[in-house]
Image: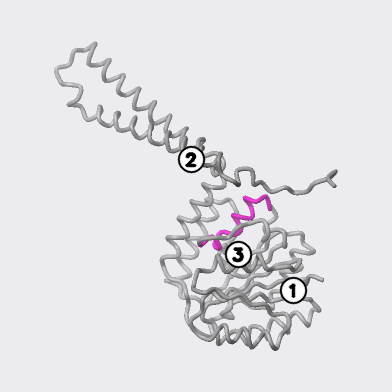
């Protein structure tokens, strides 16, 4: 029988924290009589993390391990963990002990009894550096809420709970783990909730993230928003923008030519900056239109052009 809970733990150089984390998870799940599995994904650790995972697997039959040959990042680790998960509810948490396993029962109930498709943790009180992590994180989440329309205070929190169907319906790649709620919403899962969770001070090791994640994260968000709206119909964006720019430039050039003819100005048409601005606008409009045309050809010939999620089927054998 599949377990009630699959706990996916991506890790990178966390050998010191793993024994305590597994003992804590085991205690919480046993106290609440949950059947569970822990899928530990070693993202190319250079310390003894994998050896620790192997030793823990001998002590806990619930542990399953996946090891990458090198460091690929958190998104690929989550993707492989999601592929391997079989539990009715899938919970993700970081391996550094900053996420508390004591949150598992409430997260589980919110999905099973509350009917949520996804529940994201909100670290309302944080123990990170206020300048390098807290302030940028607040600005980052404010931009995310504004652009995505998903009202979560901490979209990047590693502690989340999902209905199994959610993790099987989304593809997490690149650095898209920051925007899993956006991916879930785009896949048709609308009931997304939030829970205030405990954030604990880091006990071992150092943070693996720097300032560059905020720049990359913003670009990834724009990519997701574009793909969700225009991924199947790029001509609607590039074609419309290109046509508008070409038409604007054409009207401007026509007006300049007409003004030259009817008013017989001494200044040559090619001596006017407006002429070159209008010409540049027409050229850019043509390029945008061609970009949309080529993108449309690519989409229409892609193998997954009709890869749409089906909620349910009836009347089929």
> Which badge, 3 or 2, comes first in the chain's sequence?
3
Q: Which residues are magenta?
A: 175-189
Q: Few, some or many C-alpha atoms within 10 Å of disc 1 (few <14, some 14-19, many ≥20)?
A: some
- The correct choice, above or below, for 234 with respect to 159 in the image is above
Q: Main secondary structure of the magenta part?
A: helix
Name the spot of residue 76 as percent of width and height, x first. Answer: 55, 66
- When asked about the image quadrant of residue 305, the answer is top right
- The correct choice, above or below, for 278 with respect to 261 in the image is below
- When asked about the image quadrant of residue 19, the answer is bottom right
Name the spot of residue 8 as percent of width and height, x first. Answer: 65, 72
Q: Which mark is residue 295?
A: 2
Residue at point 38% right, 28% down? 246
Residue at point 17% right, 26% down? 271
> Which badge, 2 or 1, comes first in the chain's sequence?
1
* Helix, strand or loop status at disc 3: helix
* Helix, strand or loop status at disc 2: helix
């Amino acid at each position: 029988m599949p377990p009630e809970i699959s706990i996916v733990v991506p890790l990178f150089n966390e050998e010191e924290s793993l024994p305590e984390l597994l003992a804590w998870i085991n205690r919480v799940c046993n106290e609440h009589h949950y059947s569970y599995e822990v899928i530990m994904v070693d993202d190319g650790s250079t310390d003894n993390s994998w050896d620790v995972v192997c030793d823990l697997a001998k002590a806990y039959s619930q542990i399953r391990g996946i090891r990458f040959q090198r460091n690929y990042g958190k998104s690929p680790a989550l993707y492989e963990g999601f592929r391997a998960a079989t539990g009715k509810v899938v919970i993700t948490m970081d391996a550094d002990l900053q996420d508390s396993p004591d949150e598992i029962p409430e997260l589980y109930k919110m999905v099973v009894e509350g009917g949520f498709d996804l529940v994201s943790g909100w670290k309302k009180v944080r123990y990170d550096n206020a300048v390098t992590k807290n302030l940028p994180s607040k600005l980052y989440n404010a931009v995310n809420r504004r652009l995505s329309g998903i009202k979560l205070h901490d979209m990047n929190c590693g502690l989340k709970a999902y209905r199994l169907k959610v993790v099987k319906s989304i593809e997490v790649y690149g650095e898209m783990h920051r925007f899993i709620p956006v991916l879930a919403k785009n896949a048709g899962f609308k009931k997304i909730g939030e829970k205030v969770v405990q954030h604990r001070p880091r006990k071992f090791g150092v943070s693996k993230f720097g300032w560059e994640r905020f720049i990359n994260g913003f670009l990834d968000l724009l990519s997701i928003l574009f793909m969700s709206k225009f991924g199947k119909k790029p001509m609607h964006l590039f074609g419309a923008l290109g046509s508008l720019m070409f038409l604007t430039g054409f009207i401007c050039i026509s007006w300049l030519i007409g003004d030259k003819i009817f008013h017989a100005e001494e200044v040559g048409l090619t001596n006017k900056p407006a002429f070159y601005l209008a010409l540049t606008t027409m050229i850019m409009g043509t390029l945008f239109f061609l970009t949309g045309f080529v993108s449309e050809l690519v989409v229409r010939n892609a193998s997954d052009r009709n890869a749409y999620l089906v909620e349910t089927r009836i009347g089929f054998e």
